[in-house]
Image (cartoon, coloured by chain):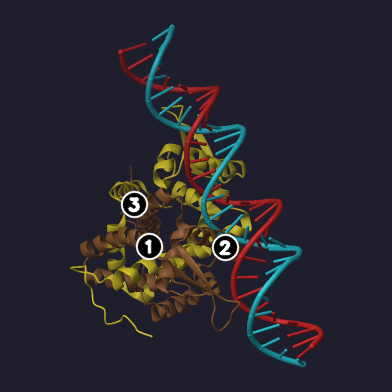
Chain colours: A yellow, B brown, C cyan, D red
DNA sequence: TTGGAAAGTCAACAAGACTGACATATATTG
DNA sequence: CAATATATGTCAGTCTTGTTGACTTTCCAA
């Protein structure tokens, strides 16, 4: 059985193909870990990841319009609408007619919605906190840096605008 | 408009909630960037992400059994089977009866399968390479460290065994 | 005032996950 | 050898979450 461990980078100035491959697989497997805890919680409520994402960003930038949320999530309005309707019907999200433009709907979490948001985000933060803690502050900086570089340029603007608008809780 | 930039960590010994939140959103948005290029390519072939994943790991650990692939992907055999059947029917994957245990099927990419694999992985590696390059080698180390910490313990074993088995090409 | 654009909703469909039941071939064990 | 267990494949049905297309309501500008 021949191993290819000795095969050194050929096509690359900086990163070996092996390092890139490892990074790719890490993204795949780590994303699983990242979503696992919230997913388990969501099962108890018969909601899915799509609901979690909506709840997260409505909490994050409270009062945002459907269209803004659409842009953040990168799905069609029809897809979002199904999820949103459930959350409104179940009393987790409130959809108020816009004051300036009455075509728009401004979205807010109800107290009930806040409750679920807290449960979900605490689980997710806890795993993130553990990872941060075990890896150390220097590693965290690198982690953020690489991920920021991996964003699409269009997304980069969105994330920044969220950070500006956002008032967490 | 009040900003919350001055709000300092309250509940945490090490990482502020704001830093954790940023990490969480980065994971979400960066994963989109990560899958974007392959997704676009797959559209041309009427395949999806599920096919990509199968192709990736069959290439990665050539000759692996259906059961091993199942474990890596973390899906049911019915789900994998649909995808695998298409790939075999289309002549991208070969499924050989095991030599020791004839119940098993060992999976290999055909030349045609290799071709698609290369197209997909080159696109994905290119984005990863750019991110690595722009972020720098120190950041890459941190990136890997944090992601490794984010894995589920069970997954950690799998990834290591893949790295051992793997003989890329 | 009227026509177009924007926001949201309804309906139908597709991919890819899931469960459950079952078939077949092969291995292993009593 | 017979019985049981394992590996794989398949059929059928369901669920979530994405898609397109068609439609209504509302706003704004020519």
Is A80 situated above or below B122?
above
Residue found at x 47% / y 77%: B158
Query: Dot 3: few (<14), some (14–19), or many (≥20) neighbours within 10 Å?
Result: some
Which corner quadrant holds the N terminus of chain B? top left
Separation of disc 3 and disc 2 at Cα? 50 Å
The answer to whether one can see residue A165 in this image is yes
Say which element carries label 1. helix
Q: Name the N-terminal-most of marks 2 and 1.
A: 2
Query: Dot 2: few (<14), some (14–19), or many (≥20) neighbours within 10 Å?
Result: few
The answer to whether one can see residue A138 in this image is no
Find residue C21 and report its horizontal and vertical position in percent. 76, 63
Q: Name the N-terminal-most of marks 1 and 3.
A: 3
Separation of disc 2 and disc 1 at Cα? 19 Å
Circles 3 and 2, Cβ within 8 Å, touching? The answer is: no
Image disc number at residue B117 = 1
Circles 2 and 1, Cβ within 8 Å, touching? The answer is: no
Query: Dot 1: few (<14), some (14–19), or many (≥20) neighbours within 10 Å?
Result: many
Is B162 situated above or below D9?
below
Chain holding disc 2? B
Find residue A112 and report its horizontal and vertical position in percent. 58, 49
Is A24 situated above or below C3?
below
Q: Quadrant of residue A30?
A: bottom left
Nearer to the camera, A51 or B10: A51
Residue designated by label 3? B4
Q: Quadrant of residue B10?
A: bottom left
Nearer to the camera, A81 or C18: C18
Nearer to the camera, B117 or B158: B117
Residue designated by label 2? B81
Which-is-in-front pick, marks 3 and 2?
2
Chain holding disc 3? B
Separation of disc 1 and disc 3 at Cα? 46 Å
């Amino acid at each position: 059985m021949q191993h290819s461990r000795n095969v050194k980078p050929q096509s690359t100035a900086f990163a070996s193909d092996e390092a890139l491959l490892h990074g790719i697989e890490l993204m795949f497997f780590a994303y699983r870990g990242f979503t696992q805890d919230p997913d388990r919680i969501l099962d108890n409520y018969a909601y899915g990841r799509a609901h979690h994402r909506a709840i997260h960003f409505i909490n994050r930038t409270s009062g945002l319009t459907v269209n803004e949320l659409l842009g953040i999530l990168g799905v069609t309005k029809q897809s979002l609408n199904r999820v949103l309707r459930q959350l409104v019907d179940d009393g987790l999200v409130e959809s108020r007619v816009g004051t300036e433009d009455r075509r728009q709907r401004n979205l807010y979490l109800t107290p009930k919605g806040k409750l679920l948001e807290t449960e979900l985000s605490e689980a997710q933060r806890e795993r993130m906190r553990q990872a941060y803690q075990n890896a150390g502050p220097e590693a965290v900086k690198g982690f953020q840096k690489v991920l920021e570089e991996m964003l699409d340029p269009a997304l980069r603007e969105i994330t920044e605008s969220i950070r500006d608008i956002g008032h967490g809780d």
